[in-house]
Amino acid sequence: MSAAAPRSPIRRLAPETVRRIAAGEVVERPASVVKELVENAVDAGAEEVVVRLEGGGLRRIEVADDGGGIPADELELAIERHATSKLAADGSIEGIRTLGFRGEALAAIASVSKFRIRSRTASANAATGITVTGGEILGRFEAGRAVGTTVEVEDLFFNTPARRKFLHAPAAEQVEILRMIDHLYLARPAVGIWIEADGREVGAYPATSDLRDAAARVLGPEILHQSFAVDGDLPGGGHVRGVLGRPATAAGHSRGLYLAANGRTIQARAIAQAVRVSYHDYIPKTRYPIGVLHLELPPERLDVNVHPTKREVRFAREAEIADAVRLAVRHALIGAPPPAEPPDPSAKPRAQHFLVETRGVGRSSLPPPPRRDAMAASGPAPQRRLDTTEPPTRRAASAGGRPRLTLLGCVGSLYWVAEGEDGLVLVDQHAASERLLYDALLREGKLARQELVEPITIHLTNTQRAALLAHTEAVRSAGFTVEPFGGDAYRLRSVPSWRGGRARTEGLSALLDELAAGARPTVPDGAMERTAASIACHSAIRAGDPVAPAEMSRVLDALYEGAEAVYSCPHGRPVLLQVPRSRLDRWFLRSGP
Ligand code: ADP
Ligand code: MG
């Protein structure tokens, strides 16, 4: 009590104060202005939007579109708070299809800047505009303009100095703007967006109906041949479609995954997490999938009125939707065909910091336009498995353009040493073998079995017996044939075999132990994956197992036939490490080859 300041009576805020507080919610920084203006253009049916920036948008933002325009007599209304043309007269916001509906953005922007809007509808002979400063309308004017709308915003936050303090340097604000445009474009790639900064083009986002094209613009051209399509149903009538990067393209941060729902860019942690879980056994825990997913839902299942900037949305039955997304992604990932064409050898490897690299400075740093001929040649990626038509050698050649490996030897009965095209490759024999078995299991649903000439009698514990009963089918598809032999004794008639190798008999009890224990903490998800990971782990070559060179070579070849397998074992541990020649040279202080 004592420390409290003397209380003043409750007063109503002055309208001006209310306006500024409200504006603060919608307009945080230049990027939020750009977002609102571009969204308005999209809602107005624009095909192209041009964004011009000065000083990172702090000095000036101009957004011009070729949409339907605003009738001259509605201009004043357009900048009034809570005035919108996007809601029906009854004000129902369920089933909203437009990006805007709160009628706040123009009012907010106009109250914290020097603002001009001019617009022309198809029925008008010229454009009409109004000038507004700090929310005060200063005057009207006529101007020449094609049908559409131009909004100019100067000196953002000129009258709210507190807000200005939270802004970054212009270059950083510009990065934010481009990031925002990435999101807007990937949610609606049918609308082209062009960005100029201080007179130079810094971003070209041409309209396209092909999400892969659009993704290449934002995520880099590598995605054209390093991706797979996702297409699945959502419960309650809906769809998820999109393009995701192969595991090799996974990024060191989570910003490379773009989600949209009903054409609106969204942040939805549950969905992003579902996508990530789908990759859990393909990428290490420190990496994140990249790509674009579009969710289409009946509008009443999407509550967009959660956040003033509409950044967050709420899904009805979110868990179900997330689960359906996970299944759709998982299905597509496992069934993804090998890369459609060998990557362009001149293409730089994906940098982890592509978001920084591809924007901010100049046009030359943007990804080059997608190569139409290349797209046509590769065509849409067919949804089929990789084992059908192509002979193994072609697959090997196209598997990410990796050369075959020449085996050099083995260290400590664990690490194999091989020479690749560009230096040294180290392979973990257990992780590699485990990964291959796991892939084979997921692909075929079972492992081959090898009949034992002499059945072996084994003894199972109570829990192992219970696990055997509960998972008869899993154990059988793992390649183990087990028969009761009285009491706790069982006869083992076959063991999993694979490419000339075969599992040890102890693999069965280890597998049963794990099945009894339920989830392996490191393999979070899905009974099938869990079982496959257990089987693979216990059937695989183990650390310390002596392996014949011929078998090593077979495993290496197989690794290089799979498109993704080399990156990690089912638990996300690395399968191989590459030491490029250049690094060897550096180690030995050699400057060149
Ligand atoms: P909202 O988008 O939520 O309706 P805004 O304040 O962003 O609210 O815009 C107010 C109204 O002004 C819109 O409902 C729309 O009728 C009109 N408007 C704004 N920008 C444009 C534009 N670029 N083209 C056509 N009409 C626009
Ligand atoms: Mg709006």
Image (cartoon, helix red, strand yellow):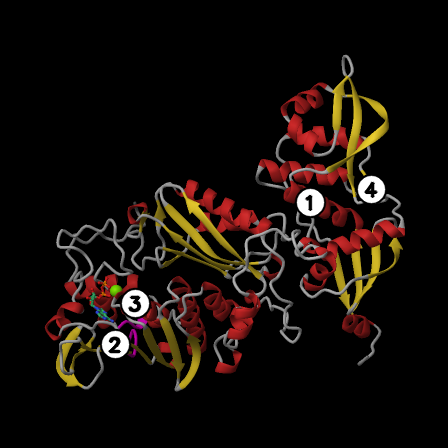
Residue at mark 3: 42
Q: Amino acid at mark 2?
A: Val
Who's the residue at 73% across and 45% down the image?
434
Q: Quadrant of the N terminus?
A: top left
The numbered mark at residue 501 is 4
- Mark earlier in primary sequence (3, 1): 3
Q: Are marks 2 and 3 in contact (CB under 8 Å)?
A: no
- Mark earlier in primary sequence (4, 1): 1
Q: Where is residue 2 drawn, in percent x and y?
A: 30, 47
Q: CA distance from mark 4 to mark 1?
A: 14 Å
State which mark lies toward you, 1 or 2.
1
Who's the residue at 65% across and 36% down the image?
531
Q: How many marks?
A: 4
Direction from residue 528 to residue 368 in the image, left or right = left
State which mark lies toward you, 4 or 3.
4
Q: Quadrant of ligand 1?
A: bottom left
**Residue in front for this viewpoint, 443 or 571:** 443
Q: Amino acid at mark 4?
A: Gly
Q: Where is residue 515 drawn, in percent x and y?
A: 66, 30
Q: Are marks 4 and 2 in contact (CB under 8 Å)?
A: no
Q: CA distance from mark 2 to mark 3?
A: 14 Å
Direction from residue 21 to residue 571 in the image, left or right = right
Who's the residue at 56% across and 72% down the image?
374
Residue at mark 2: 151
Q: Amino acid at mark 3?
A: Val
Q: Amino acid at mark 1?
A: Ala
Q: CA distance from mark 4 to mark 2?
A: 70 Å
Q: Is mark 2 within 8 Å of ligand 1?
A: yes
